[in-house]
Image (tube, helix red, strand yellow):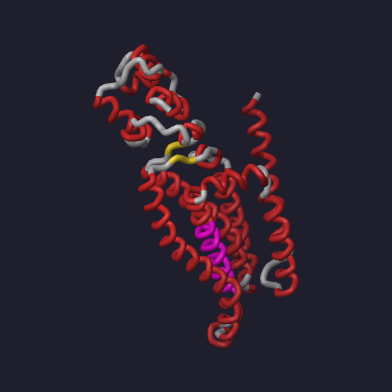
Amino acid sequence: MTFGEKLKVLRKEKGYSQEEFAGLLNVSRQAVSKWESDRGTPETDKLLQISNMFGVTLDYLLKEKSPDENTQTDGYYMSREMIDGFLSYKRERAKKIACGVGLIVVSDVFGCFSDYRQMLLPLYWGSIAIGIAILIWTLFQPKYYQEIHTKALIFDDTLIKAFREESNRNRKRYVSMIILGVLLFFFGSEFLFMAESIIGREICNALNWFMDAAAVMLLIIAGTSIHAENIITQNAEYIKKKNTRGKFAWIYVALPITGIAVLIGVITNAWSPVFPIILLFCALLVTVCKLLIEKRDMK
């Protein structure tokens, strides 16, 4: 790709018209048109502005690609700043979802104290309502970095190599979080059972719900972080799998997980067997609402 072709692609990906882009650089629209048709090149200070604006290197802008690289004209160039922004966005979103789910799970704490159950009932429903509100608010927020999910990514070789090494180090931390979450979920109740004679049954039950909430939150945050970094490090495989599985592949995973959660609830009485079904129904309802909104926006 020539400089003009790259500039045109970057401008359109940001949604700028030639006039808007020219205004940001304090040049005429004719100058932008000349650059994009390769009839001229910006001055050095303008090149630096363009580089910072789109998060690309000067090498990427000025060096023409080899014939093999020209097959990636629909690719999306990723700078380190864009990678960090994408990962930060995904982590913050995961924390909000984890917080919403955690509030729903921990709401059962207020039902553990039989003598104060009626008094604590507003707190029970309030916790559930706030948790659901956080989830709905988060899921319906505008989504950013959608190009990273749909396009083949282009990296500088040194950048992607360094990031993969960093990702491997991060993975150890995320795996530790997952292991801790699993241990809390499956063995926390056993530990509390041994302490029941010391701190009392009601307090043990309350602490058990706190442990379950913490476990779920750890799993959501760690799982989302691993998935986000995999999108970067395994971009080609991710795009291929996404195109093969389709947009609603999560349903095929959610159904068996819901069945297992219901079965565990029936056998261990750790939670109400209806609870996983309600969560799945809410997820399906949110998906239908999003489809209706997308269909409306397309009209």
Quadrant in the rendering for residue 155: top left
Q: Is residue 143 above or below residue 25?
A: below
Which residues fall within the magenta stretch? Answer: 205-223
Nearer-the-camera pick, 282 or 114: 282
Q: Could you say where residue 252 lies in the image, as x and y percent from the top left?
A: 71, 53
User: Residue 167: image x %, image y %?
Assistant: 43, 57
Which residue appears at 54% of the width and 87% of the height?
A: 198
Image position of 274 with respect to 285: above or below? below
- The secondary structure that most of the magenta stretch takes on is helix
Q: Is residue 77 a member of the stretch shown in magenta?
A: no
Residue 9 relative to residue 108: left or right: left
Q: Is residue 235 visible?
A: yes
Q: Which quadrant holds the C terminus? A: top right
Reply above or below: 82 against 97: above
Q: Quadrant of the N terminus?
A: top left
Where residue 274 sits, quadrant-wise, is bottom right
In the displayed image of the protein, which residue is found farthest to the bottom? 197
Residue toward you, 127 or 42: 42
Q: Residue lying furthest top in this view?
A: 30
- Regarding residue 207, the answer to whether it shows in the image is no
Q: Is residue 207 magenta?
A: yes
* Residue at screen point 44% across, 60% down: 168
Q: Give the side of residue 159 with respect to residue 150, left or right.
A: left
Up the image or down, 259 lies above or below 49; here it is below
Q: Position of residue 66 (x, y in %)?
A: 42, 33
**Where residue 19 sits: x, y (%)?**
40, 16
Asked whether, in this view, residue 288 is left or right of residue 38, the answer is right
Q: Identify which residue is drawn at 36% across, 36% down.
A: 56
**Residue at coordinates 57% horizontally, 70% vertically from top-left?**
182
Give the tally of numbered discs.
0
